[in-house]
Image: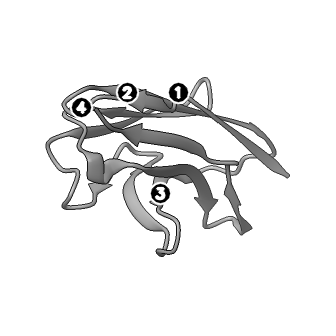
Amino acid sequence: QVQLVESGGGLVQPGGSLRLSCAASGSIFSPNAKGWYRQVLGKQRELVAVITSLGRTNYADSVKGRFTISRDNAKNTVYLQMNSLKPEDTAVYYCNLNSPLDRNEYWGQGTQVTVSS
């Protein structure tokens, strides 16, 4: 089993920044991809950004140029640096981990990000 624990959410004004962290523990297969998704009540969960073990990244068009995903493999932690935040970035952000060697996919408990003045 794998556990993902997120931190770093909160309330921020438009134009502000937040940094989310997600620490993974347990039986983690490598290679793997770690990602961030977000969900607004009543809407589908959507991909925000993903990073592979080799450091390859992919971003949603809506966050390109504003968000940066990174990972520390030694700490099994993935980060999401969010700059120039907009009200439409308000959502619950979830950490995700998956590996081609593990049939399971893992999710964190979610952390609320609210962008409001």
Give the distance between the C-alpha atoms of the residues marked 2 and 3, in whole angstroms: 15 Å
How packed mark 2 is, by other alpha carbons closer than 10 Å (few <14, some 14-19, many 20 or more), is some
Query: Could you tell whether 116 is left or right of 105 in the image?
Result: left
Q: Helix or strand or loop: what does disc 4 sit on? A: loop
Q: Which sits in the foreground, 38 or 114?
A: 114
The residue sitting at 78% across, 44% down in the picture is: 3
Q: Earlier in the sequence, mark 2 or mark 3?
A: 2
Report the residue marked by disc 4.
83
Find residue 8 and name its label: 1
The residue sitting at 24% across, 31% down in the picture is: 83
Give the distance between the C-alpha atoms of the residues marked 4 and 2, in whole angstroms: 7 Å
Q: Nearer the viewer, mark 2 or mark 3?
A: 2
Q: Quadrant of the C terminus?
A: top left
Give the distance between the C-alpha atoms of the residues marked 3 and 4, in whole angstroms: 16 Å
Which three-letter amino acid code belongs to the residue tagged 3? Tyr
Which three-letter amino acid code belongs to the residue tagged 1? Gly
Find residue 78 and report its horizontal and vertical position in percent. 51, 35
Report the residue marked by disc 3.
37
How packed mark 3 is, by other alpha carbons closer than 10 Å (few <14, some 14-19, many 20 or more), is some
Find residue 60 and report its horizontal and vertical position in percent. 27, 60
Residues at circles 2 and 3 in contact by the CB criterion of under 8 Å: no
